[in-house]
Amino acid sequence: MNGLNTKTGRVARFGLLAALSLVLGYFDRAIPLSALLGGAVPGIKLGLANTVLLYAVYLMNWKSSLLLMLVKVMLSGFLFGSLNAILYSLSGGLLSLAVMLGIRKRPAEGALGISLLAMASGAAILVRSFPPRGALLWCILLIGLAALAAGIAFPVIRKHPEYGVLGTSLAGAVAHNLGQVLAAGAVLRTPQLLYTYLPILAGVGAAVGCLTGIIARQVFRALRLHPEGA
């Protein structure tokens, strides 16, 4: 590990993480998660590349984390997406990174906040009668899963701080979706996305955020890394 503290080591690590995030980003696009859900939630992904950003948040400084996110967004956009995809990913990435950096030392509170957001989003779905009945069950299940995941994460993290990465990942995933919806609403001039599509993504984000948090936790253990709160 001492070699990683040298300038050459840090550059090598950064390059490795950037390459890994691109590979995982490709797999994110290759896995038809939306199709598996019957097309009820278009455009959703597992967010496997976020495990790399979680590593950066806990084991690198904020400048390196920001640079890694920017490199990943730009290269992924040019290789696999479009200019709009870059804009949406950048908006989501900036908000997600800011949230994860802000709560990584208080992840339990972050998980609780996401739980409240999920329940509020679920209420918005019912009040607005969105989406159509064919997809309503999926949406309710996803929002319920979000609230359950965050509700369980809060006491677990409070009792076992070493699992804090789960709360950080969960909050970061939902923040990423929020940033994307805000950008899409501004570009497309459709602010109603905040009370239609966002509630669905809040549920999905919380669920996949827990998944990536578990993966990150196992990676930290396998590499025998013990960053604070992870």
Image (cartoon, rainbow, N blue to C red):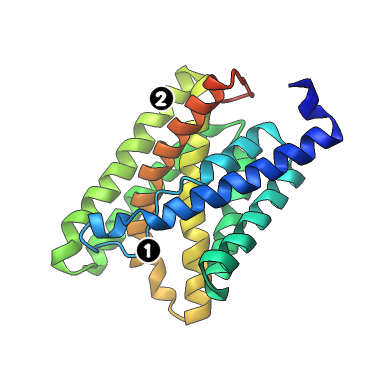
What mark, if any, has residue 174 been given in the picture?
Answer: none
* Camera sees residue 108: no
Q: Residue furthest right?
A: 7
Q: Amino acid at mark 1?
A: Gly
Q: Position of residue 65 (x, y in %)?
A: 69, 45
Q: Position of residue 206 (x, y in %)?
A: 39, 45
For the image, the number of numbered tags is: 2
Which residue corresponds to the image point at 52% horizontal and 27% vertical from the top-left?
219
Left or right, 122 with respect to 210, comes to left
Q: Amino acid at mark 2?
A: Pro
Q: Mark 1 falls on what kind of element?
A: loop
Q: Position of residue 175 (x, y in %)?
A: 51, 52
Q: Position of residue 150 (x, y in %)?
A: 38, 37
Which residue corresponds to the image point at 52% horizontal and 76% vertical from the top-left?
186
Splitting the image into 4 quarters, where does residue 228 fall?
A: top right
Splitting the image into 4 quarters, where does residue 11 fall?
A: top right
Please name the residue that numbered disc 1 is placed on. 43
Left or right, 34 with respect to 180, comes to left
Residue 225 vertical placement versus 120 (above, below)? above
- Picture quarter with the N terminus: top right
* Camera sees residue 92: yes
- Compute the Cα span from label 2 to label 1: 32 Å
Residue 195 vertical placement versus 171 (above, below)? below
Please name the residue that numbered disc 2 is placed on. 155
Within 10 Å of disc 2 (Cα), the crowding (few <14, some 14-19, many 20+) is some
Left or right, 76 with respect to 155, comes to right
